Image (cartoon, coloured by chain):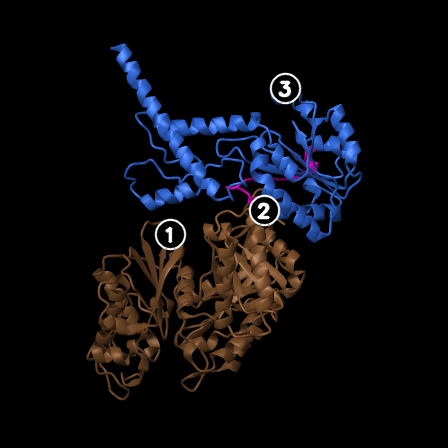
Chain colours: A blue, B brown
Amino acid sequence: MEQQLEYLVDKVVAELQKKLSERARNGSAKALGAFDGSESPVHVVEEERGANVPNPKWQEGMQELLDSTPARIGVWRTGVRPLTRTMLQLRRDHAAAVDAVYGEVQQSLLDEFSLFTVETQYDNTENYLKRPDMGRILNEEGVRLLLERCQKKPQVQIVVSDGLSASAVDANLRDVLPALLDSLTSYGLSCGTPFFVRGGRVASMDHIGELLQPEVLVLLIGERPGLVTAHSMSAYMCYRPRKGMVESERTVISNIHRQGTSPIEAGAHIGTILSKMLEQKASGVKLVL
Amino acid sequence: MDEQWIQSVGIDVGTSTTKMIVSRLRLGRMSSTFSLPRYQIVERQLLYASAVHPTPLIGADEIDAEGIGAILAAEYERAKISLSAIKSGAVIITGETASKKNAEQIVHLLAERSGDFVVATAGADLEGVLAGKGAGAQKRSLSIQGTVVNVDIGGGTANAAYFYRGKAIATVTFHVGGRLIRLDKRGMVQYVSPNIKSWLMAKKLQVQPGIQLTVEEIGEIAGEMVRDMLDYVTGRDRQESGLLVLGHQLRERIPVEELSVSGGVGQLMTDRPVHTMAQVSEYGDFGPMLGYVLQQERKKGTYLLRWIDPEQTVRATVIGAGMQSTKISGSTVHIKPELLPIRNIPILKLELTAEHLHDSSRLHSEVAAVYDMGQRLFERTTEIPFALSLSGIRYCSYQQLQRIADELTLPYRHQFADSPTMVVLCELDMAKALGQALELRCKGKPHIICIDQVRVEYGDYIDLGEPISGTIIPVVVKTLAFDEHTSIKGGTR
């Protein structure tokens, strides 16, 4: 009897997983279609969001609520628990968040933009998570590479880092970075040698500032992934970054991803912010935008 | 900049009355400091409302432009508002007035004398929507599930606007208004508008100048007119009532949950009895009777809807024009302040699909088709021929952006070589990136104005105001889609 039950449960679960993975495949195929095939290394799953509520009293009102938030509302229930589908979606999104933290930025992407790589003292991801301070300082090899390969005292220094989400860089860099470079051209600003920092934290910009002494620095870094998206990127900007900077001296545009702040528009706007920083010789709370 | 006030004016030159208001609109930052800036109009305050003046006329079909100028000058004086402080607003020449022969002259005059603001000349459709907003119907529709209709009944026309969940979904205009039949103190008919003659015939109602009517007869005519209009609005019957419609007919029957009546006649909807000829002809027309029979219909409750009181009656349109006509663009845009304001630019729509974004050749031919249409539709001038509106893009990558910019600029510079400025409107938040991509290609020939978060349709005209704090611009979208008074379309160009 017990064995039979176990067998049944196993079969149901296997069936569910098959269905779910099919749906995910269809979803990502759709999302891939939005790119030019070869363009996308990241599987961004965009699903049609519908409520699970059977026979809602007011269908359009339900849809209005769903459209107003990415939160998991209208998910319905079975007994006192969520539906299996909801539960699996939650676990899948959680897994994507974990993958984003442990993943690595694709080398081909870095090559595309001729970004060379330096590392912080993070050592490995486990240590990176436990020791944020070690992600703020480049290792000896990194310092040597920077001094050797980068232009000193540039007007604008662009730095890219994986931070807590490598997939954020994979998903957004192709849109943010060229839009930012165009914006710098429009404003007539010159840019130093951009590079990639593996295992970086936001404050790594201070150490880089000490080494290269740019007038302004922008760090494009993967954000802590959440359950809504694992591909969100931030742009931290600073006027004359140096050791001992306080957080209020940094300006940030966050939540850059397909469903959030538009990547191309963010790239274009970062240029505007940088030019204002140069004008006002300030950043963070002192900057008037 | 976290908040900012702009002053906005509304002027309504109606068939029988003229009024103006001054309001101020507060722009507040809606996004956090960690996001791209995004502003919205978060508060609207009425600063000044003028008295309701009789519209000065010369003869039967000419508006006294000087008279209107004098009224406005006096009202600005009284409101203690300097013209230079006014950044936005709308002038509405309503109803039958718009077909008066010198409407265009008036619009020019008002543009000069009302401050350097964004001027809108409206058609009946926009007028109805603005009146509905002024009367509070739009706001009301956000708090119920069904459709709310506001009918603004003035001297010459009645404008009905249907709102569903905050959106205007349909408009219709009727030849229903107080001044359509004018009476003297004894009930002698002085004037009957030619616009209602075919309807009167179909209804077998004998009304013409020179005949004397009793209070009951006037009540019957007003009753027939009001019931036909309500039948049409609710979709109960559209045969004879269709003769009252000015301009386009409604195609569908839209279930109406709530109804409000604004305008001068809306104000006359009181329980005050209208039994004697003196009471009927108080204003020299049958307006009071229209108000009275509407009130009777409301009491009888023969229509399956809820009657609600409008927030404004006689000033609904002018308040809508002054306080609700202005929108603001997204805050990350590509503009050159010295090129603004730009007025009365027609819209040309480029609707893109996923295929266009993938396939350069399809995008190329689509742009060519739209540009050719622009060349056919809008005369060749040395001015800006049109504003190109991009829609249908759900997400735009940098590569796609480059393709769009390439395809837009080359043929534009070829086909519209005389145009000093290229105006592009996007629905999606991408104006700064696109504007910058276009600018890098054009280098000032033409100049680029690219703004976003503005929704427009074919047939709309758009006014772009001077920037506020350098980044946001006030926008008035003029829906003239069904406007038949083409004479004023050219407006203030």
Taking the magenta stretch, the answer to whether it contains residue B386 is no
> Magenta region: which residues?
A246-266
Which disc, if any, is residue B414? none
Give the residue type that dot 3 points to. Answer: Asn
- Residue at the (74%, 30%) spot, across then down: A207
Q: Find residue A253 and report its horizontal and vertical position in percent.
A: 61, 41
**Discs 2, 3 touching: Cβ within 8 Å:** no
Give the residue type that dot 2 points to. Answer: Ile
Give the residue type that dot 1 points to. Answer: Arg
Query: Which comes before the other along the chain, label 2 or label 3?
Result: 3
Q: Chain of mark 1?
A: B
Q: Chain of mark 3?
A: A
**A247 relative to A59 in the view: left or right:** right
Which disc, if any, is residue A264? 2
Element type at marker 2? helix
On the same chain, marks 1 and 3? The answer is: no
Element type at marker 3? helix
Q: Can residue B81 be seen here? A: no
Q: Find residue B305 and report its horizontal and vertical position in percent.
A: 26, 57
Residue farthest to the bottom, as pictured: B210
Q: Which residue is mark 3?
A: A127
- Residue at the (23%, 72%) spot, across then down: B240
Q: Find residue A248 and report its horizontal and vertical position in percent.
A: 68, 36
Q: Chain of mark 2?
A: A
Q: Find residue B484 and report its horizontal and vertical position in percent.
A: 40, 74
**B62 relative to A211 in the view: left or right:** left
Q: Which residue is mark 1?
A: B165
